[in-house]
Amino acid sequence: MKAIIFDVDGTLADTEDAHREAFNDAFEAAGLDWRWDRPHYKKLLAVTGGKQRIRYYLEDHDPDRLRHDTIDAEIAALHQSKTTFFVARLNDGQVPLRPGIKELILEARAKKMTLAIATTTTPVNVTALLEANLGADATGWFSCIGDGGKVPVLKPQPDVYLWVLAQLGLAAGETLALEDSRNGLIACRRAGVPCLIVHNEYTEGQDFTGALAVWRSYRGVTVDKLHALHAKAHAKAV
Ligand code: XBP
Ligand code: MG
């Protein structure tokens, strides 16, 4: 294991409630009566990417609207507004890292591990989350940051992982991905990247077949534990 690749939403932090509230803020600011509660949002998480998620919602909620000529621009503007609301929440310190994540990142840095990010979210969201929780220079701790702005198709397609591997110059089997969701796991599997799932309230109960392990928390997770997990998978594969 030469590099650890971190997902962002649901892995570095439990961001999804803040995303959900930011979507609702954007809908309200646009004079729309759309509101996403937690059970409904859990279903909408089947689709990654905020713009894609709005479109998916409209397929049920208002399919006629999807046929308007201006729908792409309308969704783009709503998503832009949602991002502004979301980043404000991050900058306010409303979204902490998951317990154990900061310790793991600091330990991995001290041990000179290569760190990278593979996410489907919007680039400014990643920067704001890292800077708010780890300090102004934290984006520089990661050798590369693959995000929704770098690849045309999002998870569960493998593109963001393949992009990250190419940037790192590493083979998939030399890395370990940390993910929280089935979509993230499928993206890893398609890219050949070994994947540890640490689920959360939104992703608990999903099908995690093919994960190296499924854990509940990052509390007490050390680089040595990740090495051991990776070595076991490697031994099985050869
Ligand atoms: C996370 C997502 C993201 C966020 C919204 O998936 O699906 O789309 O919910 O972010 P993953 P944007 O953790 O698998 O990367 O609104 O910026 O798209
Ligand atoms: Mg995730």
Image (cartoon, rainbow, N blue to C red):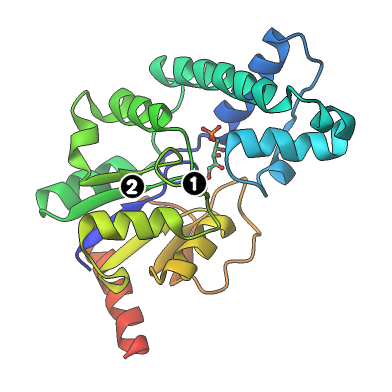
Q: Nearer the viewer, residue 114 or 135?
A: 114
Of badges 2 and 1, nearer the viewer stands 1
Residue at 81% across / 26% down in the picture? 68
Q: Quadrant of residue 222?
A: bottom left
Counting from the top left corner in percent of width and height, residue 189 is at 48, 69
Counting from the top left corner in percent of width and height, residue 7 is at 41, 48
Q: Is residue 6 left or right of residue 142?
A: right
Q: Secondary structure at mark 2?
A: strand
Q: Residues within 10 Å of mark 2 (few under 14, many from 20)?
A: many
- Under mark 2, the amino acid is Ile
Counting from the top left corner in percent of width and height, residue 136 is at 21, 23
Q: Nearer the viewer, residue 95 or 220?
A: 95
The C terminus: image quadrant: bottom left
Residue at 67% across / 38% down in the picture? 53
Question: Pointer 2: what residue?
Answer: 117
- Under mark 1, the amino acid is Pro
Give the alpha-carbon distance from disc 2 to disc 1, as whole Å: 17 Å
Q: Quadrant of residue 39?
A: top right
- Tag 2 near tag 1, CB within 8 Å: no
Q: Is mark 1 within 8 Å of ligand 1?
A: no
Q: Is residue 189 left or right of residue 78?
A: left
Q: How many numbered markers are drawn?
A: 2
Q: Is residue 156 left or right of residue 23?
A: left
The dot on residue 152 is 1
Task: State which tag comes first along the sequence, 2 or 1.
Answer: 2
Q: Quadrant of residue 166?
A: bottom left
Q: Measured along the vertical axis of the image, is residue 57 above or below residue 136? A: below
Residue at 60% across / 34% down in the picture? 50
* Residue 220 in view in this figure: no
The N terminus: image quadrant: bottom left
Residue at 69% across / 20% down in the picture? 74
